[in-house]
Amino acid sequence: MTDTVHDVIIVGGGIMGCATAFYLAAADDRLKIAVVEPDPTYEKASTTLSLANVRVQFSLKQNIQISQYTLEVLDSFEEDMIVDDQKPRIAFRTEGNLFLVDESNLSAAKEAMALQAGLACRVEWWAPEKIHQVYPLYKTQNILAGTFGCQDGHLDAYGLLMGYKAKSRSMGVAFTKDRVTAVRRAGQQVTGVAMQSGQKLLAGIVVNCAGAWADQVAHSVGIDIPVVPVKRQVFVMDTKIKLQGPLPLTILPSGLYFRTETGGLIIMGKSMPEDPVGIDFSWDDKRFQDILWPELAEFVPAFDTLKLMRGWAGLYAVNTLDGNAIVGEWPELKGFYLANGFSGHGLQQAPAVGRYISELITGQPLSLDLGIFSPHRILDNKPLSESGLV
């Protein structure tokens, strides 16, 4: 079996891998780029199992700027990604994100909103009366305020992924169905990857975009990163009361979140400390019955009568150091780049991160400096602070 030579190998063909491939190909059409993805159906991909939310409501400047760029991209994405007259459909709905505020997060919410306002984000501070006026089903008794981002919303994650993938392929990027079993090195330089099929790909640059499997890829070349796969569950309900309009993604101070879904359904979830670590896609309706539904019904009494329609589990690639992305070249191995640890925010951060990685590799001026997310902080054990993680 003949080894194939490339300039860049991207491990993982989800949204991060495809976005990175697109921006690399756009930056330099001479690059020979290969994307290795074991499951092109994306049945278990975090991209397609996510709620596909996009928001500017973060408390770290660079996370806000990343989302602002994503909103720019989404505005013309369907036109920009046309291939052979085929236009991707991403169905971006700006129905808003509403973060609820109580005494526990009041100070952090005020600081975050001040930062967002300074970056020209369209986020409003709503009093409880305004929340109840706009969404009368909500019980605001213990709520002090809410921050509403009118540009925030959700989209068709599969459509976004396929848009980047099809465009990348049309630009000459090669997609290979296989699983990377090891990153190869010679001393302090990456030399390529070995794959499950037995084939080897050679390249001086390898980008780890493996999502929930990122730690395995890094470990194969002797690198430990603080990224673990954590199971998150989502539930879809049909409520007895029928809504007159959409509800925004509403995030309670406890972390419970819900929004309307196509067909007048309600979709909800909650990240919890006891969520299991590991590759596990089972879901448990007992979690919904015993924990989430009672909390939801307390805030929205009209939802005390409903029917659980379905559910699923997906994986967050959680950065256990600080919940933020790890982006850039690993300091101790030349040519090994990381785009990992997005902790549930990878879909909305893929455009800016993919562009940034491409600029690092090609040596182009940085459109947005994301050096704050450098892997150096992993080695230095210096976590970032971000209060807007969900």
Image (cartoon, rainbow, N blue to C red):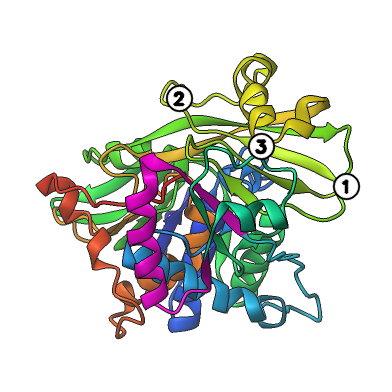
**Residue 220 in sight:** no
Evaluate whether residue 251 shows in this view.
yes
- Mark 2, Cα crowd under 10 Å, few <14 / some 14-19 / many 20+, is few
Closer to the N terminus: mark 2 or mark 3? 3
Q: Earlier in the sequence, mark 3 or mark 1?
A: 1
From the image, tell me which residue sits under label 2: 278
CB contact under 8 Å: marks 2 and 1: no
Across and down, in percent, residue 240 comes to 89, 32
Question: In whole angstroms, how far apart are the C-alphas of marks 2 and 3?
Answer: 22 Å
| Left or right of residue 217, residue 177 in this image | right
Point 36% across, 77% down: residue: 118
Q: Residue 119's image quarter?
A: bottom left
Relative image position of residue 187 (x, y in whole percent):
13, 51
Residue displayed at 68% across by 17% down = 289
Mark carried by residue 263: 1
Badge 1 local density, few (<14 within 10 Å), some, or many (20+)? few
Callout 2 amino acid: Gly
Span colored in magenta: 97-124
Q: Which residue is mark 3?
A: 268
Query: Is 104 within the magenta?
Result: yes
Relative to 323, does residue 24 appear above or below in the rendering? below
Is the residue 200 above or below the residue 312 in the image?
below
Q: Nearer the viewer, residue 221 or 50?
A: 50
Q: Name the element at disc 1.
A: loop
